Amino acid sequence: MSKPKKKSAAKGESPKASKKKAEAKSPTYRIPADSPWANAWKVAAAFGGIGLVASIFGMTSDPDRFAYSWLFAFMTFLAVGLGALFFVLAQHLTGAGWGVTLRRVSEFLMSGLPVFALLFVPVFFNMDRLYPWLEHGEHGEAHEEEHGDGEHGDGEHGDEHGEEAEHGSWLGLGDGTAQAQDPRDPWDMHPDEVAAQAAEHGAEEHGEHHDPEHQLHGEILESKNWFLSRGFFLVRMALYFALWIAMFWFYFSNSTRQDKEKGKLAITKRMELLAPVCTILFGVTLTGAAIDWTMSMEPSWYSTIFGVQYFAVSAVIAHAVIILITMGLRRSGLIGNAVHVEHFHDIGKLLHGFIIFWAYISFSQFMLIWYAGIPEESTYYHLRWWGGGGFLNLSVIMILAGFIVPFFILMSRNAKRNLPVLTFGAAWVAVMHIVQCYWLYMPYAEQTGLVATSLRLHWLDIASLLAVGGIYLAVVFWNMTRYPLIPVGDPRVERALHHEVV
């Protein structure tokens, strides 16, 4: 009696059918329709809509406060998108395999960059409120057309300086010039004393105070006129957005196309080939945007390290948000074990390292300005330190809660491998990022001379955060519903799935 033939392991199914069934059982890394993440973009859009309506109302009732609040929210979330773009560039620049499964979340975060071109519109229409050099430049051009070069006398020029000093000068920093006349260290002088000297200085005739220090300061300001002009400002703005959107589109479109053309090495090589050029363009445009949109709010103040500081801010917040979103996707079971403890350990090390880098850059800027004791450089810290309990306390909080607390939370190897602790540390850093941006931008909304008179949390600050953050995150979460949550077509994905920290 013949024995029955053995059936295949798949109960008589053909090899092709078994393979298709196995592929069907393999994770798709997509958000299903019944997942809370599928509606996350709607929730974000709802908050964004509420914030936008409130902001529009605030724009009509308190346009000055709205301008500063919107810029604060804009730069806060722009840092997230730019930091995510940096993470993607760094992965391709180094040819890293460990972070492939983490890369898609950062690609989603950078996919919201195009919306910032629209979110910049309120900044554009409030430029005259935010950037005092615009009024000065236009006034200077009109004055030259009226009087011609060198036709105005010392008396006219002195009256002009007196007016500027009385109102804090066209920069809000005429008092910084007067500090150069005082033998005391500018850090030991209260801004009220400095402002009084500035008013006295401006009220007198220009010829009597044509000392070398004042002349040098004036030359510095005049030398910036070609750069701080409305037309050139708008050209640079358009260039920043064009390059950011081009870089986003190139890397996002190629990465998602690779999902369909799995294992196609040519796409990976193309992205890696352009990474060095894109990294240089990223550094130049981020620095330019930080100078144009932030540092020029105080145009006579300058710091060659300011662009690096904003880069550090962007890198820190981006790594924190990547951790938080990836952790949420993992807990929802949407990415399985594609991102595990080993990945979180590595990105935790990056987060901790960039926190130290941010602190180092911030201290370097402060230390060099304090050590040199140059009046027009010290105005930046006068504004945030002499303002009394509000911004003075916030400055101390930035040192303690912005650096020391997360430094010790994330310092241990065990902490970076303990996912609840890492999540808490990343959330803490994200909150402190908002506080730091508030410290950067809002003193100008409360400025009187060199002093930020109070720390006044306004409802427009919250509304602007909801509007900008809600609209930006709605785009990010919507894209998450359209593509796999990890780059399934990347040829290094298998290596990333089995990544282990040595």
Image: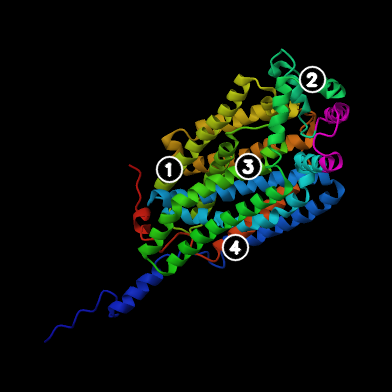
Mark positioned earlier in the residue sequence (3 or 2): 2
Badge 1: few (under 14), some or many (20 or more) residues near its Cα, within 10 Å?
Answer: many
Closer to the observer: label 4 or label 3?
3
Residue indicated by mark 1: 345
User: Comparing marks 2 and 4, which lies closer to the viewer?
Assistant: 2
Q: Earlier in the sequence, mark 2 or mark 4?
A: 2
Which residue: 55% across, 61% down? 480
Q: CA distance from mark 3 to mark 1?
A: 31 Å
Residue 190 has which mark?
none
Which amino acid lies under the numbered mark 3 shown in the image of this protein?
Ala
In the picture, measured across the screen, residue 141 lies left or right of residue 316, that is right
Say what secondary structure mark 4 lies in: helix
Tag count: 4
Give the residue at mark 2.
209
Tell me the distance, in whole angstroms, between the alpha carbons under discs 4 and 3.
28 Å
CA distance for labels 3 and 2: 34 Å
What's the residue at 63%, 42% (across, down)?
290
Task: Look at mark 4 in the image and give the residue it sits on.
Answer: 478
Q: Distance between the Cα atoms at labels 2 and 4?
A: 61 Å
Q: Residue furthest top?
A: 183
Between discs 4 and 1, the one toward the N terminus? 1
The residue that label 3 is drawn on is 290
| Kind of residue sitting beneath label 4 | Trp
Is disc 4 surrounded by few (<14), some (14 to 19) or many (20+) residues within 10 Å?
many
* Residue type of the residue flagged with mark 1: His
Q: Is residue 456 at all visible to an observer of this figure?
A: no
Q: Residue at x 59, y 28 (%)?
A: 365
Using the numbered discs, state the Cα–Cα distance from disc 4 to disc 1 in whole angstroms.
28 Å
User: In terms of sequence position, does the residue under pointer 1 or pointer 2 come before the other?
Assistant: 2
Q: Which residues are magenta?
A: 142-169
